[in-house]
Protein backbone atom coordinates (compact mmCIF):
# COMPACT_ATOMS: atom_id res chain seq x y z
CA UNK A 1 0.00 0.00 0.00
CA UNK A 2 1.29 3.41 -0.91
CA UNK A 3 2.49 5.37 2.11
CA UNK A 4 2.91 9.09 1.62
CA UNK A 5 0.94 10.38 4.58
CA UNK A 6 1.99 13.85 5.78
CA UNK A 7 3.25 14.72 9.21
CA UNK A 8 1.57 17.40 11.31
CA UNK A 9 4.35 19.82 10.35
CA UNK A 10 3.75 19.12 6.67
CA UNK A 11 0.05 19.80 6.98
CA UNK A 12 0.86 23.09 8.68
CA UNK A 13 2.47 24.27 5.45
CA UNK A 14 0.27 22.22 3.14
CA UNK A 15 -2.56 24.68 2.77
CA UNK A 16 -0.74 26.56 0.06
CA UNK A 17 1.49 24.09 -1.73
CA UNK A 18 2.63 20.50 -1.46
CA UNK A 19 5.81 19.90 0.44
CA UNK A 20 8.50 17.32 0.97
CA UNK A 21 10.21 18.32 4.17
CA UNK A 22 7.81 20.66 5.91
CA UNK A 23 8.87 24.27 5.55
CA UNK A 24 11.79 23.29 3.31
CA UNK A 25 9.54 22.12 0.45
CA UNK A 26 10.44 24.96 -1.91
CA UNK A 27 14.16 24.50 -1.44
CA UNK A 28 13.82 20.85 -2.42
CA UNK A 29 11.60 21.57 -5.41
CA UNK A 30 13.98 24.21 -6.69
CA UNK A 31 16.81 21.70 -6.66
CA UNK A 32 18.55 22.33 -3.35
CA UNK A 33 17.87 21.86 0.36
CA UNK A 34 18.94 23.07 3.76
CA UNK A 35 22.00 20.83 3.73
CA UNK A 36 23.15 21.75 0.25
CA UNK A 37 22.14 25.27 -0.59
CA UNK A 38 23.21 27.05 -3.72
CA UNK A 39 26.89 27.96 -3.55
CA UNK A 40 27.06 30.74 -6.08
CA UNK A 41 29.61 33.36 -5.26
CA UNK A 42 29.48 36.84 -6.74
CA UNK A 43 31.65 38.42 -9.38
CA UNK A 44 32.54 41.99 -10.11
CA UNK A 45 30.29 42.56 -13.12
CA UNK A 46 26.83 43.94 -12.34
CA UNK A 47 23.37 42.81 -13.39
CA UNK A 48 19.74 43.68 -12.77
CA UNK A 49 17.76 41.49 -10.40
CA UNK A 50 14.57 41.41 -8.37
CA UNK A 51 15.33 41.22 -4.64
CA UNK A 52 13.38 41.48 -1.39
CA UNK A 53 14.88 42.43 1.94
CA UNK A 54 11.74 42.16 4.06
CA UNK A 55 8.52 40.15 4.03
CA UNK A 56 5.37 41.77 2.78
CA UNK A 57 3.20 42.57 -0.27
CA UNK A 58 4.53 42.84 -3.83
CA UNK A 59 5.84 46.32 -3.08
CA UNK A 60 8.76 44.77 -1.18
CA UNK A 61 10.11 43.43 -4.49
CA UNK A 62 12.73 45.81 -5.91
CA UNK A 63 14.61 45.88 -9.20
CA UNK A 64 18.21 46.70 -8.31
CA UNK A 65 21.76 46.41 -9.63
CA UNK A 66 23.63 43.55 -7.96
CA UNK A 67 26.82 41.64 -8.58
CA UNK A 68 26.73 38.87 -11.15
CA UNK A 69 26.96 35.40 -9.57
CA UNK A 70 29.68 32.84 -10.32
CA UNK A 71 28.85 29.11 -10.40
CA UNK A 72 30.07 26.71 -7.74
CA UNK A 73 31.74 23.43 -8.61
CA UNK A 74 28.45 21.61 -9.25
CA UNK A 75 26.56 24.57 -10.65
CA UNK A 76 25.55 26.19 -13.90
CA UNK A 77 25.43 29.94 -14.49
CA UNK A 78 22.55 30.77 -16.83
CA UNK A 79 21.90 33.98 -18.73
CA UNK A 80 18.19 34.25 -18.06
CA UNK A 81 15.93 34.80 -21.04
CA UNK A 82 12.63 34.13 -19.26
CA UNK A 83 11.31 33.10 -15.87
CA UNK A 84 7.90 32.11 -14.51
CA UNK A 85 5.90 32.90 -11.38
CA UNK A 86 4.71 30.18 -9.01
CA UNK A 87 2.52 30.35 -5.89
CA UNK A 88 5.54 29.49 -3.76
CA UNK A 89 7.13 32.78 -4.87
CA UNK A 90 4.54 34.94 -3.17
CA UNK A 91 4.64 32.75 -0.06
CA UNK A 92 8.39 33.37 0.11
CA UNK A 93 7.73 37.06 -0.47
CA UNK A 94 5.27 37.26 2.41
CA UNK A 95 7.05 34.75 4.63
CA UNK A 96 3.78 32.93 5.11
CA UNK A 97 2.82 30.70 6.75
CA UNK A 98 5.07 31.79 9.58
CA UNK A 99 6.56 28.29 9.92
CA UNK A 100 8.24 28.84 6.56
CA UNK A 101 10.47 31.45 8.16
CA UNK A 102 12.26 28.75 10.14
CA UNK A 103 13.95 27.83 6.88
CA UNK A 104 14.22 31.16 5.06
CA UNK A 105 14.74 33.67 7.88
CA UNK A 106 12.83 34.57 11.03
CA UNK A 107 13.02 38.37 10.83
CA UNK A 108 13.65 38.71 7.12
CA UNK A 109 14.80 36.64 4.16
CA UNK A 110 18.30 35.21 4.54
CA UNK A 111 18.59 35.03 0.77
CA UNK A 112 17.19 38.10 -0.95
CA UNK A 113 17.15 36.59 -4.45
CA UNK A 114 13.74 35.81 -5.89
CA UNK A 115 12.18 33.32 -8.33
CA UNK A 116 12.85 29.72 -9.38
CA UNK A 117 11.52 28.71 -12.82
CA UNK A 118 14.00 29.67 -15.53
CA UNK A 119 14.92 29.29 -19.20
CA UNK A 120 18.04 30.71 -20.77
CA UNK A 121 21.52 30.11 -22.15
CA UNK A 122 24.38 28.56 -20.20
CA UNK A 123 27.04 31.20 -19.56
CA UNK A 124 29.51 29.13 -17.54
CA UNK A 125 29.71 25.86 -15.61
CA UNK A 126 31.51 24.60 -12.52
CA UNK A 127 34.33 22.08 -12.81
CA UNK A 128 32.13 19.12 -11.77
CA UNK A 129 29.40 19.80 -14.33
CA UNK A 130 29.48 17.14 -17.07
CA UNK A 131 26.19 17.23 -19.01
CA UNK A 132 25.84 20.93 -19.81
CA UNK A 133 28.24 23.41 -21.37
CA UNK A 134 28.41 27.09 -22.30
CA UNK A 135 25.98 27.95 -25.07
CA UNK A 136 23.39 25.28 -24.25
CA UNK A 137 19.79 26.49 -24.13
CA UNK A 138 18.33 25.17 -20.87
CA UNK A 139 15.27 25.20 -18.64
CA UNK A 140 14.75 24.19 -15.04
CA UNK A 141 15.13 25.76 -11.61
CA UNK A 142 17.63 28.30 -10.32
CA UNK A 143 17.77 30.37 -7.17
CA UNK A 144 17.04 33.98 -8.04
CA UNK A 145 15.52 33.38 -11.49
CA UNK A 146 14.08 36.90 -11.67
CA UNK A 147 17.40 38.37 -12.76
CA UNK A 148 19.64 38.69 -15.78
CA UNK A 149 21.82 35.80 -14.53
CA UNK A 150 21.12 32.97 -12.10
CA UNK A 151 22.89 29.89 -10.75
CA UNK A 152 21.41 26.44 -10.37
CA UNK A 153 22.57 22.89 -9.81
CA UNK A 154 23.09 20.75 -12.89
CA UNK A 155 20.60 18.20 -11.55
CA UNK A 156 17.84 20.82 -11.72
CA UNK A 157 18.45 21.84 -15.36
CA UNK A 158 18.20 20.24 -18.80
CA UNK A 159 18.43 21.28 -22.45
CA UNK A 160 15.14 22.98 -23.32
CA UNK A 161 12.68 21.72 -25.98
CA UNK A 162 13.81 22.79 -29.43
CA UNK A 163 10.32 23.70 -30.58
CA UNK A 164 9.54 26.05 -27.69
CA UNK A 165 10.47 29.66 -27.04
CA UNK A 166 12.31 30.60 -23.87
CA UNK A 167 9.07 31.96 -22.40
CA UNK A 168 7.28 28.69 -23.10
CA UNK A 169 10.14 26.65 -21.66
CA UNK A 170 10.22 28.77 -18.50
CA UNK A 171 6.58 27.90 -17.86
CA UNK A 172 7.40 24.21 -17.43
CA UNK A 173 9.67 23.40 -14.49
CA UNK A 174 7.82 23.41 -11.17
CA UNK A 175 4.25 23.08 -12.47
CA UNK A 176 4.97 20.44 -15.10
CA UNK A 177 7.29 18.42 -12.82
CA UNK A 178 4.52 18.42 -10.20
CA UNK A 179 1.92 17.24 -12.73
CA UNK A 180 4.19 14.50 -14.12
CA UNK A 181 5.24 13.09 -10.78
CA UNK A 182 1.71 13.27 -9.35
CA UNK A 183 0.22 11.28 -12.24
CA UNK A 184 3.04 8.87 -13.04
CA UNK A 185 4.68 8.23 -9.68
CA UNK A 186 1.93 8.80 -7.13
CA UNK A 187 -1.19 8.12 -9.18
CA UNK A 188 0.39 5.21 -11.08
CA UNK A 189 -1.82 6.27 -13.98
CA UNK A 190 -2.21 3.67 -16.73
CA UNK A 191 -3.57 3.85 -20.26
CA UNK A 192 -7.35 3.50 -20.35
CA UNK A 193 -7.87 4.61 -16.74
CA UNK A 194 -10.13 7.47 -15.75
CA UNK A 195 -8.52 10.49 -14.10
CA UNK A 196 -10.19 13.57 -12.66
CA UNK A 197 -8.20 16.80 -12.34
CA UNK A 198 -9.66 19.29 -9.89
CA UNK A 199 -8.25 22.67 -10.96
CA UNK A 200 -7.58 21.75 -14.58
CA UNK A 201 -7.12 25.33 -15.77
CA UNK A 202 -4.33 26.29 -13.36
CA UNK A 203 -0.57 26.00 -13.67
CA UNK A 204 -0.31 22.35 -12.61
CA UNK A 205 -3.73 21.42 -13.98
CA UNK A 206 -3.10 22.54 -17.57
CA UNK A 207 0.02 20.39 -17.68
CA UNK A 208 -1.69 17.49 -15.93
CA UNK A 209 -4.52 17.32 -18.47
CA UNK A 210 -2.07 17.04 -21.35
CA UNK A 211 0.27 14.60 -19.62
CA UNK A 212 -2.66 12.36 -18.64
CA UNK A 213 -3.79 12.25 -22.28
CA UNK A 214 -0.25 11.45 -23.37
CA UNK A 215 -0.32 8.53 -20.92
CA UNK A 216 -3.50 7.27 -22.59
CA UNK A 217 -5.97 8.14 -19.84
CA UNK A 218 -9.59 9.31 -20.06
CA UNK A 219 -9.47 12.82 -18.64
CA UNK A 220 -12.13 14.79 -16.80
CA UNK A 221 -11.25 18.37 -15.88
CA UNK A 222 -12.91 20.53 -13.24
CA UNK A 223 -12.87 24.30 -13.84
CA UNK A 224 -15.05 27.41 -13.97
CA UNK A 225 -17.35 28.35 -16.83
CA UNK A 226 -14.86 30.70 -18.47
CA UNK A 227 -12.23 27.97 -18.70
CA UNK A 228 -14.31 25.13 -20.16
CA UNK A 229 -13.11 25.59 -23.73
CA UNK A 230 -9.51 25.93 -22.60
CA UNK A 231 -9.64 22.63 -20.70
CA UNK A 232 -11.30 20.91 -23.64
CA UNK A 233 -8.59 22.20 -25.94
CA UNK A 234 -6.01 20.50 -23.72
CA UNK A 235 -7.56 17.12 -24.51
CA UNK A 236 -10.07 16.64 -21.69
CA UNK A 237 -12.73 14.09 -22.64
CA UNK A 238 -15.19 15.65 -20.20
CA UNK A 239 -15.35 18.91 -18.26
CA UNK A 240 -17.22 19.66 -15.03
CA UNK A 241 -18.16 23.31 -14.48
CA UNK A 242 -17.86 23.69 -10.72
CA UNK A 243 -20.22 26.68 -10.75
CA UNK A 244 -22.96 24.38 -12.04
CA UNK A 245 -22.17 20.96 -10.57
CA UNK A 246 -20.26 19.27 -7.74
CA UNK A 247 -17.98 16.58 -9.14
CA UNK A 248 -18.17 14.63 -5.87
CA UNK A 249 -21.92 14.12 -6.48
CA UNK A 250 -21.46 12.62 -9.93
CA UNK A 251 -22.10 9.03 -11.05
CA UNK A 252 -18.70 8.37 -12.62
CA UNK A 253 -15.93 6.71 -10.60
CA UNK A 254 -12.28 7.61 -11.21
CA UNK A 255 -9.16 5.50 -10.96
CA UNK A 256 -7.00 8.54 -10.20
CA UNK A 257 -7.96 11.91 -8.74
CA UNK A 258 -5.48 14.78 -8.93
CA UNK A 259 -6.59 17.51 -6.53
CA UNK A 260 -4.94 20.86 -7.21
CA UNK A 261 -7.51 22.83 -5.20
CA UNK A 262 -8.36 20.97 -2.00
CA UNK A 263 -11.85 22.47 -1.69
CA UNK A 264 -13.57 19.15 -0.90
CA UNK A 265 -13.00 16.81 2.02
CA UNK A 266 -11.45 13.42 1.47
CA UNK A 267 -14.78 11.88 2.47
CA UNK A 268 -16.48 13.74 -0.38
CA UNK A 269 -13.76 12.85 -2.88
CA UNK A 270 -13.81 9.18 -1.95
CA UNK A 271 -17.43 8.95 -3.14
CA UNK A 272 -16.23 9.10 -6.74
CA UNK A 273 -12.94 7.24 -6.29
CA UNK A 274 -13.09 3.71 -7.69
CA UNK A 275 -12.12 0.66 -5.68
CA UNK A 276 -8.34 0.56 -5.87
CA UNK A 277 -8.34 4.24 -6.86
CA UNK A 278 -5.52 6.68 -6.05
CA UNK A 279 -6.11 10.18 -4.71
CA UNK A 280 -3.19 12.61 -4.97
CA UNK A 281 -3.33 16.02 -3.35
CA UNK A 282 -1.20 18.60 -5.13
CA UNK A 283 -2.27 21.86 -3.53
CA UNK A 284 -4.57 23.76 -1.25
CA UNK A 285 -6.96 22.96 1.55
CA UNK A 286 -9.80 25.02 2.96
CA UNK A 287 -10.38 23.02 6.07
CA UNK A 288 -8.40 22.77 9.30
CA UNK A 289 -5.17 20.92 9.87
CA UNK A 290 -6.61 18.87 12.72
CA UNK A 291 -9.67 17.70 10.80
CA UNK A 292 -7.49 16.77 7.82
CA UNK A 293 -5.20 14.65 10.00
CA UNK A 294 -8.15 12.84 11.55
CA UNK A 295 -9.66 12.26 8.15
CA UNK A 296 -6.41 10.96 6.67
CA UNK A 297 -6.15 8.48 9.54
CA UNK A 298 -9.66 7.23 8.93
CA UNK A 299 -9.00 6.91 5.22
CA UNK A 300 -5.84 4.95 5.89
CA UNK A 301 -7.85 2.36 7.80
CA UNK A 302 -10.52 2.19 5.12
CA UNK A 303 -7.95 1.84 2.36
CA UNK A 304 -6.99 -1.55 3.79
CA UNK A 305 -10.40 -2.84 2.77
CA UNK A 306 -11.04 -0.82 -0.41
CA UNK A 307 -7.55 -0.73 -1.90
CA UNK A 308 -7.77 3.04 -2.27
CA UNK A 309 -4.72 5.17 -1.49
CA UNK A 310 -4.55 8.79 -0.37
CA UNK A 311 -1.30 10.71 -0.71
CA UNK A 312 0.18 14.19 -0.97
CA UNK A 313 2.64 15.06 -3.70
CA UNK A 314 6.19 15.72 -2.58
CA UNK A 315 7.73 16.78 -5.88
CA UNK A 316 11.46 16.81 -6.60
CA UNK A 317 13.19 18.75 -9.36
CA UNK A 318 15.00 16.13 -11.44
CA UNK A 319 16.92 16.60 -14.68
CA UNK A 320 15.63 13.26 -15.96
CA UNK A 321 12.04 14.41 -15.54
CA UNK A 322 12.82 17.66 -17.32
CA UNK A 323 14.12 15.49 -20.17
CA UNK A 324 10.88 13.48 -20.15
CA UNK A 325 8.90 16.72 -20.37
CA UNK A 326 11.14 17.95 -23.18
CA UNK A 327 10.38 14.79 -25.14
CA UNK A 328 6.64 15.27 -24.64
CA UNK A 329 6.91 18.90 -25.76
CA UNK A 330 8.97 18.06 -28.84
CA UNK A 331 6.43 15.37 -29.75
CA UNK A 332 3.69 18.00 -29.63
CA UNK A 333 1.93 16.29 -26.73
CA UNK A 334 2.43 19.02 -24.12
CA UNK A 335 2.33 22.78 -24.73
CA UNK A 336 2.31 25.34 -21.91
CA UNK A 337 -0.66 27.64 -21.45
CA UNK A 338 0.56 31.18 -20.84
CA UNK A 339 -1.95 33.57 -19.35
CA UNK A 340 0.11 36.78 -19.13
CA UNK A 341 3.59 38.05 -19.89
CA UNK A 342 5.44 40.72 -17.92
CA UNK A 343 8.81 42.45 -18.15
CA UNK A 344 11.39 42.03 -15.38
CA UNK A 345 10.59 45.43 -13.91
CA UNK A 346 6.91 44.41 -13.76
CA UNK A 347 7.57 41.40 -11.54
CA UNK A 348 5.64 42.87 -8.57
CA UNK A 349 2.51 43.10 -10.71
CA UNK A 350 3.04 39.57 -12.05
CA UNK A 351 3.30 38.18 -8.52
CA UNK A 352 0.26 40.20 -7.44
CA UNK A 353 -1.76 38.66 -10.27
CA UNK A 354 -0.72 35.09 -9.44
CA UNK A 355 -1.43 35.68 -5.76
CA UNK A 356 -5.09 36.35 -6.59
CA UNK A 357 -5.38 32.70 -7.61
CA UNK A 358 -7.18 33.06 -10.94
CA UNK A 359 -4.37 32.68 -13.47
CA UNK A 360 -5.11 30.40 -16.41
CA UNK A 361 -2.00 28.31 -16.85
CA UNK A 362 1.23 30.18 -16.24
CA UNK A 363 2.48 33.75 -15.90
CA UNK A 364 5.94 34.41 -17.34
CA UNK A 365 8.59 37.12 -17.00
CA UNK A 366 10.57 38.16 -20.06
CA UNK A 367 14.15 39.04 -19.13
CA UNK A 368 16.25 39.14 -22.31
Image: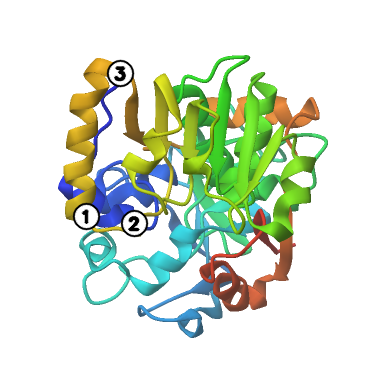
Q: Nearer the viewer, residue 321 or 367?
A: 321
Distance from disc 2 to disc 3, alpha carbons, whole Å, reads 27 Å
Q: Give neighbour class at mark 1: few <14, some 14-19, many 20+ (Cα, 10 Å).
A: some
Q: Which residue is mark 1?
A: 289
Q: Are marks 1 and 2 in contact (CB under 8 Å)?
A: yes
Q: Secondary structure at mark 3?
A: helix
Distance from disc 1 to disc 3, alpha carbons, whole Å, reads 25 Å
**Which residue corresponds to the image point at 51% horizontal and 27% vertical from the top-left?**
254
Viewer-side label of 1, 3? 3
Quarter occupied by residue 195: top right
Mark 2 vs mark 3: which is more N-terminal? 2
Q: Which residue is mark 2?
A: 15
Q: Nearer the viewer, residue 19 or 225?
A: 225
**Which residue corresponds to the image point at 28% horizontal and 56% vertical from the top-left?**
13
**Which residue corresponds to the image point at 76% horizontal and 29% vertical from the top-left?**
333
**Quadrant of the drawing holding the C terminus:** bottom right
Q: Secondary structure at mark 1?
A: helix
Q: Give neighbour class at mark 2: few <14, some 14-19, many 20+ (Cα, 10 Å).
A: some
**Quadrant of the drawing holding the N terminus:** top left
**Which residue corresponds to the image point at 37% horizontal and 42% vertical from the top-left?**
268
Q: Looking at the image, can residue 127 be seen?
A: no
Distance from disc 1 to disc 2, alpha carbons, whole Å, reads 8 Å
Viewer-side label of 2, 3? 3
Q: Which residue is mark 3?
A: 306
Q: Nearer the viewer, residue 359 or 232?
A: 232
Q: Give neighbour class at mark 3: few <14, some 14-19, many 20+ (Cα, 10 Å).
A: some
Res 202 label: none
Mark 1 vs mark 2: which is more N-terminal? 2
Amino acid sequence: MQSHLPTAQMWTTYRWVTCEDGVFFALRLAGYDGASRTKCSVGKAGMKAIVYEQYGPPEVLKLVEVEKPKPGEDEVLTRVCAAAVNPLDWHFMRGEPKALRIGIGLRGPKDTRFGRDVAGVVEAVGKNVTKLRAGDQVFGACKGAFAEYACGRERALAVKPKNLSFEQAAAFPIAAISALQALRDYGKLKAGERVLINGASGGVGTFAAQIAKALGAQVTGVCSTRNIELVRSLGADAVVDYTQADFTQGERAYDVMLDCIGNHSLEQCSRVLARGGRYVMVGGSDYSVSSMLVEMGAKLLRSIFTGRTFSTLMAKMKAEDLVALRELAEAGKVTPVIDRRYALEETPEAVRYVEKGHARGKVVIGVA
